[in-house]
Amino acid sequence: MRTILGIILFYGRFGLSFSAIGFWFRRLFWQNGQPSMAGQTVLVTGASGGIGAAVVAGCAASGARVIAVARNPDKLASLKASVGDRVVTYACDLAETNAVNGLADAISKDFGSIDVLVNNVGVMLHDFVENSEGVDAQFATNLLNQYVFTERLVASGVLAEEGAVITVASGGMYMAPLVTSALCAKEAAAHDGTRAYAVQKRAQVALTQHWQQSSEKQGQRYYVMHPGWVDTAGVQQSLPTFRKLLRPVLRTASQGADTIIWLASERPEEDNQDRIWLDRKARKTHAYGFTRANSESTERLLRFLKTFL
């Protein structure tokens, strides 16, 4: 009964807002025009399809050089062929911490600095999978290695002093408090991919606020956004019933990518408040009291993440 009530509350409150209908309505009030990102270097993870590929194409069309990172080299080659020479590709399994550390070293060596990091990669795994290091692969992909990669690029000076980090979360975090024990399963019996996904996305919000508040370089900006409900391959595979029911109003990948590209180009000022961006506007991160009241501290989250390093 509690689950059914939660579904009713969630879809009743956010159904129109997160759908393509919400996007179409809000875009009526935006200024038209192609953003200019000439001379900028943008790194996008999870870039081989869906929202990531749309971000790559949009940033390249705006004049940026784009570093596209994903696991599948064949998909990356197809992306580069379709977008053009502004795209440089790196094949990397972002579920593997050692591989992510190697990627950070390669980016530092090959480019020296980047202007924007887009932490886009994300998975929802209904079956329990461990990476080669014995860590829950969903947790490693969605949170741990995004933390590792971002920290490495910032600490080594690869992220430019006026640079930005944009992390792609999910509207599902509105139904989840920050609970570290739900972030990472140690065995199949404890794995709940849907719940873990929502909590991992809530943790991304907490991490972004931490980075905002602790950044030593005041010119750097840190944003967390969610793209609304987008018809991606991940949704097709992980949430088939959801897609079947809502397919007519799901957003396209380009619509989901719009706020990411806008943030990368405009880099609006942040007030270090607890905010998440949707359709070019900063919005509250809590819709229900239980997600705030039951959330653990960001300090506890950081201690938890560091136990894996």
Image: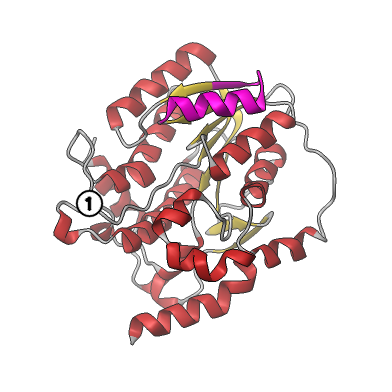
The C terminus: image quadrant: top left
Q: Which residue is at 56% across, 57% downward?
A: 276
Q: Which residue is at 39% across, 48% downward?
A: 123
Amino acid at the residue labelled 1: Phe
Determine whether the residue tagged by mark 1 lies in a helix, strand or loop.
loop
Q: Position of residue 278 (x, y in %)?
A: 62, 58
- Asked if 78 appears above or below 218 in the picture, the reply is above
Q: Residue furthest bottom?
A: 1
Q: Position of residue 136 (x, y in %)?
A: 24, 46
- Asked if 215 appears above or below 274 in the picture, the reply is above
Q: Is residue 164 left or right of residue 128?
A: right
Q: Is residue 257 left or right of residue 287?
A: right
The N terminus: image quadrant: bottom left
Q: Position of residue 197 (x, y in %)?
A: 37, 57
Q: Is residue 219 visible?
A: no
Residue 115 appears in which quarter of the rendering?
top right
In front of the other: 192 or 162: 192
The span picked out in magenta is 72-88
- Asked if 125 appears above or below 60 in the picture, the reply is below
Q: Which residue is at 52% across, 59% downward?
A: 274
In front of the other: 56 or 112: 56
Q: Residue furthest right?
A: 32
Q: Is residue 146 visible?
A: yes
> Is 27 one of the magenta-colored residues?
no
Q: Residue furthest top?
A: 109
Q: Main secondary structure of the magenta part?
A: helix
Q: Is residue 236 left or right of residue 1?
A: right
Q: Which residue is mark 1?
A: 128
- Asked if 42 appears above or below 22 in the picture, the reply is above
Q: Position of residue 38 (x, y in %)?
A: 74, 25
